[in-house]
Amino acid sequence: MSTQTEHPPAGGGAPAGGEPGESAAKGNPPGRTLTLLTVLLAVFVVPTSISGTAVALPDIGADTNAGLVPLQWVVNAFNVAFACFTLAWGSIADIIGRVRAFALGAGLYAVASLGSALAGDVLMLDVARALAGLGGAAIFSCGSAILSTVFDGPARGKAFALFGTVAGIGVALGPSLSGALVQGVGWRWVFALHTIALGLVLLAVPSIARRTHEPRREGARVDVPGSALFVLAMFLLTTAIVQGSQWGWGSAGVLALFAGAVLVLAVFTAVEKRRAHPMLDLSVLANRRYLALCLVPVAASFGFVTMLTYLPSYLTTVSGYSSGTAGLIMVLLTLPVLVCPMLAAKLVARGVSSLTLIYVSLGCLVVGDATLTLFGEHVAILVVAVPMLVTGAGMGLSAGLVDGQALEIVAPEKAGMAAGFLNTLRLGSEAIAVAIYGSLLATLLASRMREGIGDHPGAGDPVTVANEVAGGNLTGPAGAVDASARAGFTDFLVRSYDSAFHTILWILTGICLVLFLLIGGLVRADRNRGPAAAAAAATGPRAAG
């Protein structure tokens, strides 16, 4: 196994002693502050891009005369590249240095964003967005690993709390910020602004590099076969998820993509077991506590991200709110994500167990999704305000906290790999959860259309109508029936959507509950190991070498 080595800064000087992750920067708060602000600015850009780019799609389509599929890949290309390369970047960072890998990712993202702003057609934009996703993967993996290296103790908890808060702010503000830019100066400035922000990040990198002492996997080389296999497996999996709703989840193409992903992952596992320096050290996954912590964002994906994505459509389709009003109501869901990470850090600093807060966050997801079933066509917002706040707290309490706890478990020289795996699960589960929600909504609506559409002559094909309603379009299907029957048919569509929404909420509640129990079981299994095994788990990784 490789030895852990502390690398001195470029300007010389002895490496800092003490606990893992300590550095000379610990005695220099301004240096740590610069590192933190730089990482947070870069981190802010990524979720802002993920949630905000969709707002610009109509203008991009009109400007480039893009068809539906290439236009959708302006978003999908980024997400697929991000999911495919997050783990690879984390592993590379442990070898070449986290600051260097972070800088490469930020530079690639900046250049890709400039290319997006200058793209002459949608295909060039798709390629540029894929490259931006590649850079974004480095920013997230290496950024959290840098914080794990530079900070420790209570300061680390606060740093990761800010990491989670800023990511949440990026997700929440992305659509509003992009909408304002599109309306004010045009869609190209959405990407130009990313270039400017990351240009500022790159200006700070030399100073950060001089102040940061990084443990590395000495003698390790980049695992090219493992990286290629994992990227291929993630590409097949994410493409299957992205295309599932278009091709059909039971279509030959989607099933072939899923089968290919499973096959390649099996080959990847076999290859990694034989590599001296694997991209993913499978022994890390043998740590049940680490694995449990990695599953927490998966629960948040199903319990929170699905609501963040689809609840606005419910508010406009069933409750009849305008888009602007629906956006204001969504603040009840997103506000805890902005407040709770720092609250969790303060509670931990005062002696509250991190694991207790993580359990509370999981409980909030279960209870929040279950009580969101109070939503209805004529329900007052005050009735559902508490369920929305509770669901948001389920995301906010664990955001950042789980990253810090997970990276604290593994050896310092493997922090990049560990961060990469955690973020791969986070983004991958978000894509899967959103895709499953969309598929369930279309399927349930189609079932309800078949059952009742016969009572409304001229309504059209049940599946076609279901797909339009699932997209929030009631006007088109309602316009197909006679004017005298339009009000009754619209009411049928609204009731069908409301019924499907409630069914999905109970399914999401069940998934979150199962993940809660699984996470608790893994933690208990870790605690119940013998004293020798527990001691090895606590000290072995950090003493590895």
Image (tube, grey):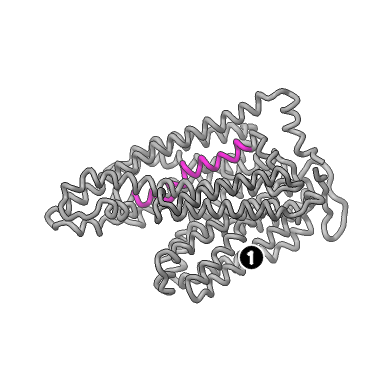
Left or right of 29, for residue 460: left
Segment colored magenta: 291-314
Closer-to-camera residue (234/501): 234
**What amino acid does circle 1 point to?**
Leu
- Name the image quarter holding the N terminus: top right
Residue 459 locus on image (x, y percent): 20, 54
Q: Is residue 186 above or below residue 143?
A: below
Residue corresponding to mark 1: 108
- Where on the picture, by quarter, is residue 381? top left
- Residue 161, by quadrant, is top right
Q: x, y (%) of residue 483?
A: 14, 58
Q: Quadrant of the C terminus?
A: top right
* Residue in the image at 46% along x and 49% along y: 255
Q: Is residue 428 left or right of residue 328?
A: right
Q: Residue at x 50, y 48 (%)?
A: 258
Q: Quadrant of residue 196?
A: bottom right
Residue 154 visible in the displayed image: no
The kind of secondary structure element at disc 1 is helix
Picture residue at 55% right of the left edge, 39% below the top: 296
| Residue 197 on image: x %, y % | 60, 65
Reply yes or no: does residue 308 show up in magenta: yes
User: Does the segment drawn in magenta span residue 63?
Assistant: no
Percent coordinates x, y for residue 399 in the rendering: 57, 44
In the visual, does 479 lie left or right of 142? left
